[in-house]
Amino acid sequence: MSRIDGYGRIDRTRTLSFTFDGTVYTGHPGDTLASALLAHDVHAVGTSIKLGRPRGIGASWNEDPTGLVQVEEPFPEPMLQASVVELTDGLVARGVNGRGRLATVPDTARYDHRHAHCDTLVVGAGPAGLLAARSLARRGDRVVLVDDRPEAGGSLAPTDRINGRAAHRFVADVVAELAEYPDVLHLQRTTAFGHWDDGFVLALERRTDHLGADAPPNRSRQRVHRIRAGRVIVAAGAHERPVTFANNDRPGIMLAASARDYLHRYGVLAGREVVVFTTDDAAYETAADLAGAGARVTLLDARPEAPAERAQHCRESGVDVRTGALVVDTSAGDGGRVSAAHVLTDGAPTTLPCDLLLVSGGWTPAAHLFSHVRGGLVYDSGLGAFRPGAELAGTDVIGAANGTLDLAGCLFEGSGGDAPSSPPEPPRTPTRVLWRTGGDPEQQFVDIQRDATVADVERAVGAGLRSVEHIKRYTTIGTAHDQGKTSGMIAAGIVAELLGRPVADLGTTTFRPPYVPVAFAALAGRERGDLFDPVRTTPVHPWHVAAGAVFEDVGQWKRARYYPQPGEDMDAAVLRECAAARRDVAIMDGSTLGKIDVQGPDAGEFLDRVYTNLMSTLKVGRVRYGVMCGNDGMVADDGTVARITENRFLITTTTGNAAPVLENLEDWLQTEWPDLRVHLASVTEHWSVFPVVGPRSRALIGEVFADVDVSNEAFGFMTWQDTTLDGIPVRLARISFSGELAWEVNVDSRYGLAMWERLVGVGALWGITPYGTETMHVLRAEKGYPIIGQDTDGTVSPHDLGMSWAVSKKKDDFVGKRSYSRAENANPLRKQLVGLLPTDSSTRLPEGSQIVAFAEDGTLPPPPVPMLGHVTSSYHSAELARPFALALVKGGRERIGEIVHVPYQGSLVPAEITGHVLVDPEGARRDG
Amino acid sequence: MQLIACPHCGPREEVEFHYGGQAHVDYPAAPQELTDEQWARYVFFRDNPKGPFAERWNHSAGCRRWFNAVRDTASYRFLAVYQPGEARPVIPETRT
């Protein structure tokens, strides 16, 4: 055991049991998986992805590139860092050898999102961030403070003192004070992982994993906070970076400050024979503290002169301090753990046996959230790192993230002037900027997780790559899930060396979100399954469900597609429903049709401008079919227009186009014709609409609405009348999308279900059949009525659809009119809507099938084969007792009677081009 | 995700808005008198500058009003919003 009494903030009164690689171990609340493993002297946790080399725990938090584990229990998760997995009782994990494994069972945990709005967001609850949050809270700001560790305090050690007291006391006081302010939201275990425009920050809160079995079952496991901040203060600290040398990837090689962290946070002494290799002052504290805890420590400083005061303190603690020394290689013992450091001291080689090799090459500011919003980074030769440069509106960076590494400086920047006191620190000796020492470049790992070495960088430079962005992509350095937190700066430095250019000129790669890996489940939150997109249902929906309807999605709407009876598949159900509509009476729920109330003295004029046909001449009480086009003259939507009063029309749109049509109409009204006195309102959901279709519909409507004269003379085709049923207003209209005698029953949606049930109940006398959208499609296709968006694709004019009759020649202008006189619109080879009948009377051609010229030998000629058009709609017709199709065919109307070929399942199916109206072309049925 | 300042509602998330293309492309007074070339220029041709660009936007998930904006197409930043029918505001060079 490497647990040291008297150190750490873990709860030693309680013991947790966990399993790693099949062995049961114990730990304590407050441990991470990494600290608990190190407490049991487990350093090696897995093997690397490309080379299969043993890898271990390399750091104490999320900068660790190597300590990757697969969690199996409580829920499988691949490739987590052992250093960030909080230990819970019963945790089962194993080391990752190469790749992790995704769960094969559904994740039942809940994930959610929450919005937060604040004056200032502070990222990082170290000394700088805490003081910034406190001073803003004191002046009354709305503040959000997030920090990714379980506890506030950042990298403060127990030996640090603020205002003459232990620093952790000071931290506890500030945290307690922040909790007093109602407008402060302080979240630990919450990582700000991305920063976008206008102070938009996403932060991931981990809410239950650390609670283990005690987690409340209803609490979301993770929560993404969507924070909109007036100002963002980045106080995210800095990452210690290593120095690259040969075989620098072995288990037992760790960042220096992380070893100190394991000692002070978790009471774990990660090695007994310790070599500390540093180019910087901070590692002296690590060396002294580890020696004080019982390790035998040798400190190798790459600089010729040691910082005198710190070196003296180390020597008093028993540390062997040597200067001018470079680690150039390592040896490994059992399990691959480091066993010795090979050192050059002023050129003379020595070997130092060790079981822990700590490395410190200086500090790289964690300026990611500044860089995400394009904050410029500048190279600081004193740090050997890039730090925030020019000011960026709305974003401030303070503390170590700004390159300020001393406690007094961090307290000053956080407090904004009125800083608490801290003991004087020894003067800093400048960091020696050192990216790598010596050894075999093939063994010098730059990005350890990616198995990318100095040799890989050499190959990239040798291949002519000059930009760090290109070299990143060529070598994959910085693309592993630590995102190069420790390797990015070193890679830039080595590239600069190889190119012989200053690293300041070369720049660094751009930081991009996310700062840490974020599960898709967390990003999705509750917007999955039924909540992925809003679901719209009509008032009759429960009836459709009870009737066993099969639904289809039309935009956000759930529409009944067909109503299978026992033993029926879709084809059988649709044939039955079609036959009922053509021979008896049938009813469908058309409530999803888009409906727009158009009101105002200029409503008629407005509609004249947006429809191809004339609407202002429509008489009150009448209905007209209308086509809307774009400026390019191509069909955009269609529907009916009913004149309700002189200054009021009700227009319908296709179900899927309701919102775009309204937006387009508003566009014309607001921007081109603001002088027109017209107002628009969507009334789609105000009205339930039920087409009642078939030869017997007249009898049913007459029975239900006894005070309405339903004769053709009194109630003609394309007219509407208002009536009441049981005191409820009802609007009836003679509109037919099937060619049959039909009424549309319109009623306030609150009475939609009751009206439907009345019609179906009374209709039982005539054997009424409910039908769905599939039958509607067949019925309209038999009549050659196009579905906009199915039989058209934005390149089809009304003339192409055979609807020249719907294009007014009287109006001076309307949207699209000028385009019809373009030469292309008169091209006889434009694709036109036609019918298509497979001559075998049995093949149902797939929609989308290509149409080619008839081939005498029955085989497809070699490519390229000229395409004549394609099938847009294809069904089996009950009425025709055969399959049929609609198609867009070049010069189609001139080709009526011709036979063409349709490639289908490896052969050519002959089909005859016909007119597009296949049932009742003379229109005899609409009046019953 | 940036905020767009709707002239009627104030700053709102950009997902509430629909883009409407170049502003100040007026519907021709007499389309039938235009040549095919002139009409095609109106229907199909739009500017595509790098830098400030006057555009139409619709606050489609809010007040449903159309408005105009000058936006820098290189930085995506909105430099001004104004009403349809108003002249394009002058943007000081330093802001672009």
Image (cartoon, coloured by chain):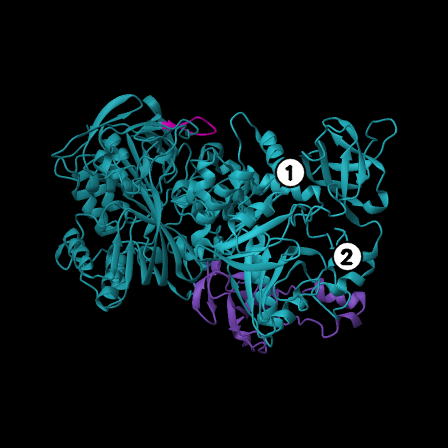
Identify by letter the chain in purple.
Answer: B
Please say if the residues under marks 1 and 2 sit with CB atoms less than 8 Å apart: no
Disc with the residue nearer the chain's start (1 vs 2): 1
Asked if the stretch drawn in magenta spans residue A152, the answer is no
Type of the residue with mark 2: Ser
Instruction: Note whether residue A539 is visible.
Output: no
Relative to A863, is A310 on the left or the right? left
Callout 1: helix, strand or loop?
A: helix
Relative to A412, is A605 on the left or the right? right
Front-most of residues B65 and A629: A629
* Badge 2: chain ID: A
Residue at the spot of label 2: A804
Asked if the stretch drawn in magenta spans residue A51, the answer is yes
Dominant secondary-structure state across the stretch colored magenta: loop
In this picture, which residue range is highlighted in magenta?
A46-54
Identify by letter the chain in cyan.
Answer: A
Q: Name the outermost residue toward the right.
A: A856
